[in-house]
Image (cartoon, rainbow, N blue to C red):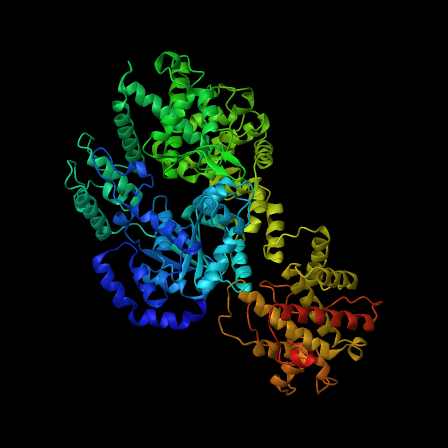
């Protein structure tokens, strides 16, 4: 399949637009991509095999109701459309990842181009070889339709050419390998009958390309205790391994836009963002909805132009559009007013559906209002059960424990409902926005039932609404009791029980929703932070501990959440305004931050480090993005900690070290020590042959040693060797042909680095031109030479037909340097030393040889030439390992 991509794309360009135009006149449900790709792949569908079974499973989504639960196909007042009926193909913006990309920034996305035709774009991408080299990253707001797009893509790809496997990342182990995650998803979907290796065999036999769709990277990051910042690289490595076995696989990864700055995105990765519906798309969806429900007695949804101000904007998100339609369908529901906000919409929707369920219940001497309050409390505790475990679901036993801790201890509950807890749990599962799965087989044992919201925003809203209500209650209660302001911390027992388990910064939507409804509680938050150390005892209910943490961790996370809420509502804010009275502000703050770090896993700490920062004068500020931590995610945790601690000195050291390491963090202390020695040599020109030989040994013994270690070794040895060719008595004994070989390999290393970071040379300078500049560093300016002959000779010094024996004069001006920063500087008298014009500057990143190299007097030149030969041999092996050949490699072999 992928081998035919050039011809395929030519066909797509030739007649794809006509086909798609005709298809779009009939529908807008991603079925045009199926027709288009069926034209490209004119082969019969596979016989009844694992591919056929998988294809039928993927297509079954088309007949399901749009909310995903078969029991919700018919509402009391409206019929829910199927996925096939309701789906509208979204618009896309597209970008390519590079060092300047800001994929979590709405302003950056506004500058990126809109895709003219989504289905033609997706078809072209899946027919290109690039799809087998790195994942397609799909971003979008909550409710934008990311998961639905992956389901439709899996359903619509023709089984005769593609074999899609959809992996909901919320349902697989976060710490498992990509291939294991795929198998876990297949086990769940196919009841253990589908095996990934068998699918690979059948796909190869049928000539189809596998497409793995990894849905919900943001949920994987929230559920994992370890950092998932390199997950996209792991996916790309998985693709490389599959391609090396002759079985290429395309991948698609989805995530919320706000989480995009927490991951490292491979350079060159194609990123798309789902756009909200435009007016025409909303009108098409409304027409489908109203036509489907026309025979019923229901209230139709008006077109966007007739909706109240503000509501029309909310309906551009597919999920909110569906909820508004469901709400409007009920003739008894109060009309949605002008200026309605997202929070108000969620509140009215949930309240409305709770009232409907309460009115259905009979045989109780309770008012609907009492039942509504009880059900809402249960739902809210279910939402906290998920958030406080750091994942989007909770099991039946977990819900029983949490509900039992709160509701079972309620004195009023005994005479109100008189129902067992397992019934309460089942009631939660019957709520309109909750999906409950029954007991299922998992390996050799039964897995308990699980409960999750059909979309995580429902749970996030319930958590935010409850916290906002609690803060407002605390503020009012304490103000009424004291009448004098906030002289002491209010009693926060219930709030502390709910806020001491997981950082809310892992759930940014919760903080955003609280910020929309709660703006006047900053004083109570300050008092809560200042008095938190005095409330380290048990809370009520004491049995509630979903995270299993101890008292110290509870204190750390509780204070972190209070500070996060304060920063969300009021930023910037002086630390002194919420520090306990009489303490040293800086010392207290640093102690608090260190307690946070000690109680958090890597992923949670990255959320904190990227969201909060300290400005001079001990001023806390809410960061809008992680740009203040640099461009390398691997550096964020350490630099974020230094900045939160207000330690500018450590932050500066980390920044310089991160630049030198290019974001690579050494695990081996010997590697780190050797690298530090190389950096010192590069900066100060003091040659340490023992360190250089140690670097050669480390790289030789460990082929996977960081590339930056080899590059810096090559740079130091090359620059020192060039200098030795100019200085007596070493000039007579240095192996100059090997020096040329070093330059040639450094040219290659520089090109490799530029390609790795996705920055081709803007002036399209060729390797030979780079080499020419390097040659000028060791030849007199006025000496004529054949650049091509030198370049070829440098790649194979053993067969060189010339000798560099005369004309060496002056100090070199510059030498090609594979590092994107300066080491050393040109002196003011450089031209006088050279005796002519200075070497032309090729690039701002080209560093210069120091005016003086401190070479040890006791170093034997024979030993140095041996070291140079070892470095050249290392460089050659690394080139060949990357399938990069110089002209003389075959003869040399």
Q: Position of residue 726 (x, y in %)?
A: 74, 77
Q: Is residue 707 left or right of residue 463?
A: right
Estimate the x, y position of residue 110 in percent, counting from the top left: 35, 55
Visible residue check, residue 268: no
In the rendering, at what x and y percent does residue 261 appear? 47, 49
Q: Nearer the viewer, residue 336 or 5?
A: 5
The foreground one among 458 and 99 is 458
Q: Is residue 44 left or right of residue 487?
A: left
Along the line of sight, the residue nearer the viewer: 406 or 399 = 399
Viewer-proximal residue among 296 and 783: 296
State whether residue 650 is above or below residue 577. below
Q: Is residue 641 visible?
A: yes
Side (left or right) of 220 relative to 819:
left
Quadrant in which the C terminus appears: bottom right
Left or right of 302, for residue 683: right
- Image quadrant where residue 464 sits: top left
Relative image position of residue 490 (x, y in whole percent): 46, 20
Residue 69 occupies quadrant: top left
Q: Identify the residue at the far front of this view.
A: 48
């Amino acid at each position: 399949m992928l081998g035919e991509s050039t011809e395929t794309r030519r066909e797509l360009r030739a007649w794809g637009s006509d086909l798609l135009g005709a298809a779009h006149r009939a529908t807008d449900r991603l079925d045009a991509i199926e027709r288009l790709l069926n034209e490209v792949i004119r082969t019969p569908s596979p016989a009844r095999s694992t591919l056929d079974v998988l294809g039928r499973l993927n297509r079954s989504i088309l007949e399901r109701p749009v909310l995903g639960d078969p029991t919700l196909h018919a509402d009391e007042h409206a019929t829910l459309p199927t996925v096939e009926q309701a789906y509208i193909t979204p618009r896309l913006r597209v970008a390519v990842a590079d060092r300047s990309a800001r994929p979590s920034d709405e302003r950056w996305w506004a500058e990126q181009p809109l895709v003219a035709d989504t289905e033609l774009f997706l078809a072209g991408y899946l027919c290109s070889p690039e799809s087998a080299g790195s994942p397609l990253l799909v971003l979008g707001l909550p409710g934008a339709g990311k998961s639905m797009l992956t389901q439709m893509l899996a359903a619509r790809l023709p089984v005769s050419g593609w074999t899609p496997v959809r992996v909901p990342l919320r349902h697989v182990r976060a710490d498992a390998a990509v291939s294991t995650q795929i198998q876990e998803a297949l086990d769940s979907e196919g009841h253990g009958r589908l095996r990934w290796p068998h699918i690979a065999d059948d796909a190869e036999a049928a000539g189809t390309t596998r497409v793995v769709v990894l849905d919900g990277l943001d949920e994987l990051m929230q559920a994992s205790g370890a950092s998932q910042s390199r997950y996209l690289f792991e996916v790309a490595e998985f693709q490389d391994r599959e391609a090396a076995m002759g079985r290429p696989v395309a991948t698609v990864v989805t995530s919320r836009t706000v989480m995009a700055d927490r991951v490292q995105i491979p350079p060159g990765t194609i990123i798309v963002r789902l756009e909200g519906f435009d007016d025409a798309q909303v009108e098409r969806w409304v027409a489908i909805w109203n036509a489907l429900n026309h025979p019923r007695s229901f209230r139709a949804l008006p077109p966007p132009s007739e909706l109240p101000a503000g509501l029309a904007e909310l309906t551009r998100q597919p999920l909110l559009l569906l909820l508004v339609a469901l709400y409007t369908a009920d003739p008894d529901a109060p009309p949605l007013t002008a200026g309605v906000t997202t929070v108000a919409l969620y509140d009215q929707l949930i309240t409305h559906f709770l009232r409907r369920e309460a009115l259905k219940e009979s045989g109780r001497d309770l008012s609907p209002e009492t039942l509504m309050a009880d059900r809402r409390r249960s739902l809210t505790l279910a939402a906290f059960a998920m958030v406080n475990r750091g994942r989007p679901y909770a099991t039946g036993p977990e819900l029983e424990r949490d509900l039992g801790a709160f509701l079972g201890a309620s004195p009023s509950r005994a005479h109100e409902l008189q129902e067992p807890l397992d019934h309460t749990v089942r009631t939660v599962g019957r709520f309109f926005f909750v999906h409950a799965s029954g007991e299922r087989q998992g390996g050799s044992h039964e897995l308990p039932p699980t409960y999750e919201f059909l979309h995580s925003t429902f749970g996030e809203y319930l958590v935010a609404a409850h916290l906002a209500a609690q803060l407002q209650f605390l503020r009012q209660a304490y103000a009424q009791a004291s009448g004098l302001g906030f002289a002491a911390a209010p009693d926060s027992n219930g709030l502390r029980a709910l806020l001491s388990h997981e950082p809310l910064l892992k759930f940014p939507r919760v903080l955003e929703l609280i910020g929309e409804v709660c703006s006047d509680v900053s004083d109570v938050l300050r008092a809560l932070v200042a008095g938190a150390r005095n409330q380290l005892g048990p809370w009520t209910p004491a049995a509630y501990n979903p995270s299993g943490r101890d008292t110290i961790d509870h204190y750390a996370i509780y204070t972190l959440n209070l500070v996060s809420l304060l920063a969300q509502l009021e930023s910037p804010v002086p630390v002194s305004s919420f520090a306990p009275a009489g303490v040293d502000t800086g010392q207290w703050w640093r102690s608090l931050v260190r307690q946070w770090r000690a109680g958090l896993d890597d992923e949670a700490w990255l959320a904190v480090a990227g969201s909060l920062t300290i400005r001079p004068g001990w001023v806390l500020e809410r960061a809008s993005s992680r740009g203040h931590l640099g461009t390398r995610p691997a550096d964020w945790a350490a630099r974020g900690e230094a900045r939160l601690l207000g330690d500018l000195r450590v932050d500066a050291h980390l920044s310089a070290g991160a630049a030198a390491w290019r974001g690579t963090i050494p695990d081996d202390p010997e590697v780190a020590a050797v690298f530090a020695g190389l950096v010192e040599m590069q900066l100060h020109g003091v040659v340490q042959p023992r360190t250089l030989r140690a670097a050669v040994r480390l790289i030789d013994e460990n082929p996977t040693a960081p590339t930056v270690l080899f590059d810096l070794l090559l740079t130091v040895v090359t620059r020192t060797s060039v200098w030795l060719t100019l200085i007596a008595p070493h000039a007579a004994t240095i192996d100059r042909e090997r020096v040329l070989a070093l330059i040639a390999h450094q040219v290659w290393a520089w090109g490799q680095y530029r390609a790795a970071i996705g920055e081709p040379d803007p002036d399209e300078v060729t390797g030979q031109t780079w080499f020419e500049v390097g040659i000028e560093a060791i030849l007199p300016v006025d000496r004529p030479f054949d650049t091509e002959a030198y370049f070829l000779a440098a790649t194979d010094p053993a067969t060189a037909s010339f000798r560099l024996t005369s004309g060496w004069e002056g100090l070199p001006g510059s030498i090609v340097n594979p590092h994107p920063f300066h080491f050393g500087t040109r002196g003011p008298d450089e031209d006088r030393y050279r005796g002519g014009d200075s070497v032309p500057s090729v690039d701002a990143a080209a560093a210069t040889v120091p005016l003086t190299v401190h070479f040890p007097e006791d170093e034997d030149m024979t030993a140095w030439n041996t070291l140079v030969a070892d470095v050249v041999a290392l460089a050659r092996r690394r080139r060949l390992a990357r399938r990069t050949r110089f002209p003389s490699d075959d003869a040399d072999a």
